[in-house]
Image (tube, helix red, strand yellow):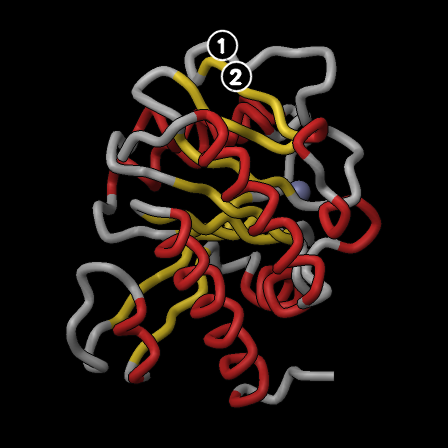
Amino acid sequence: MTASPEDAIAAVIDAGHRAAARGWVPATSGNFSARVDAARMAVSATGADKGALTRDDVLVLDIAYPRHERASAEAPLHAQLYRDRPETGAVWHVHSENAVLVSLRHGGAGAVPLAGLELLKAFRGITTHEAEIRVPILPNDQDTPRLAAQASRHILEDARLWGYLIAGHGLYAWGTTPAEAWRHLEAFDALFSLHLRSTGGHK
Ligand SMILES: [Zn+2]
């Protein structure tokens, strides 16, 4: 997928607004990016209120070297997904309550198993509720290039992987288009909510 820089920026702004409306990006957390072309991504700047994102809060960065004085510390995690998965069109990262709770519950096991649910068909490539997916949980790390290297192992290992968790932190979800990335993000959040409630850990 390629997009004009303006279309990629508009997709980032839209995702930020929608995630904020869900309460998934409290206190300026979360990051949103969309691919422009083989070499560039549009990505939200550090410190921006995602519910009030404007054109000025979105940077166009090189995926090989995502540096900018206003770049988020998590820009390397976005860039790495575009490098490892050429089909990636958008990456949405949120600190939603369900993602954080499930990451804490299963952090020790290193993954959340999800199986036997109709909603699994929301993920690209899954056509039956009889599927099982394991969402990896990485230990949190303030060294984000190192964290990106950890994520890369899982991404390259499992071609059906559309998201991972970072323990006590949040969720990265992606897709081949902005709309598909949003569908995956919503599916993960709903599946995590079901998982927490069905295993007795919901608040
Ligand atoms: Zn984060």
Image mark for residue 61: 2
| Whole-number angstrom distance, CA of label 2 to CA of label 1 | 8 Å
Among all residues in the image, which is located at the extreme right?
Answer: 27
Nearest the camera: 162 or 1?
A: 1
Report the number of discs: 2
Q: Could you say whether the residue bearing mark 1 is in a helix, strand or loop?
A: loop
Q: Is residue 129 left or right of residue 69?
A: left
Q: Residue at x 31, y 77 (%)?
A: 115
Q: Are marks 2 and 1 in contact (CB under 8 Å)?
A: yes
Ligand 1 picture quarter = top right
- The residue type indicated by label 2 comes to Leu
Location of the N terminus (image quadrant): top left
The residue pinned by badge 1 equals 65
Give the label, 2 or 1, closer to the camera.
2
Q: Is residue 153 left or right of residue 132?
A: right
Give residue 148's position: percent from left, percent from top: 49, 29
Q: Is residue 65 left or right of residue 141?
A: left
- The residue type indicated by label 1 comes to Tyr
Q: Is residue 198 above or below residue 17?
A: below
Image mark for residue 47: none
- Residue 49, by quadrant, is top right
Q: Residue at x 29, y 84 (%)?
A: 118
